[in-house]
Amino acid sequence: QVQLVESGGGSVQAGGSLRLSCAASGFTFSRNYNYMSWFRQPPGKEREGVAALSTTTARTYYSDSVKGRFTISQDNAKNTVYLQMNRLKPEDTGMYYCTTGQFISYWAWARTETYSDWGQGIQVTVSS
């Protein structure tokens, strides 16, 4: 059974940094076409894709709003994926979710319907 557990959220002032972790169990990063992704849901808005990582090719994908500020990475030995968030802005506030899926078309990474397994979410609050 797939389990995803997020940690590392919290409150920070604008310009600060946070690192989110997602510990995965029930599968391995080496499975075919595996992606680990981060989504977020700002208050009153829909869930949106933030970053994705192909755990077999190490290719990464980012939304335009976080490109250059956020970095997604993996630790295969720990079956853990990270999201390093720098130069945070108030508009980065929201619940952040870790998710995993197996798919071939990379462009599907930002679609919530691509994924079936999600973490419980963790709050990130950025104050101005």
Image: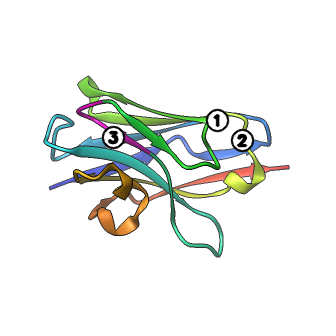
In the rendered image, the vertical position of residue 89 relative to residue 77, given as above or below: below
Q: How far apart are the two marked residues, 1 and 2, measured between alpha carbons?
A: 8 Å
Disc 1: which residue: 69
Q: Secondary structure at mark 2?
A: loop
Residue appearing at x 33%, y 45% in the figure: 36
Q: Quadrant of residue 70?
A: top right
* Magenta segment boundaries in residue numbering: 52-57
Disc 1 residue type (three-letter): Arg
Q: How is the image coloured?
A: rainbow
Residue 23 - label: 3
Where residue 15 appears, as percent x and y from the top left, is: 78, 36
Where residue 9 appears, as percent x and y from the top left, is: 57, 45
Where residue 11 appears, as percent x and y from the top left, is: 70, 47
Residue appearing at x 39%, y 66% in the figure: 112
Which of labels 3 and 1 is toward the front? 1
Which of labels 3 and 2 is toward the front? 2
Residue appearing at x 65%, y 70% in the figure: 43
N-term mark: 1 or 2: 1
Disc 2: which residue: 88
* Callout 1–callout 2 Cβ contact below 8 Å: yes
Which of labels 1 and 2 is toward the front? 1
Q: Residue furthest right?
A: 128
N-term mark: 3 or 2: 3
Left or right of residue 90, residue 96 in this image: left
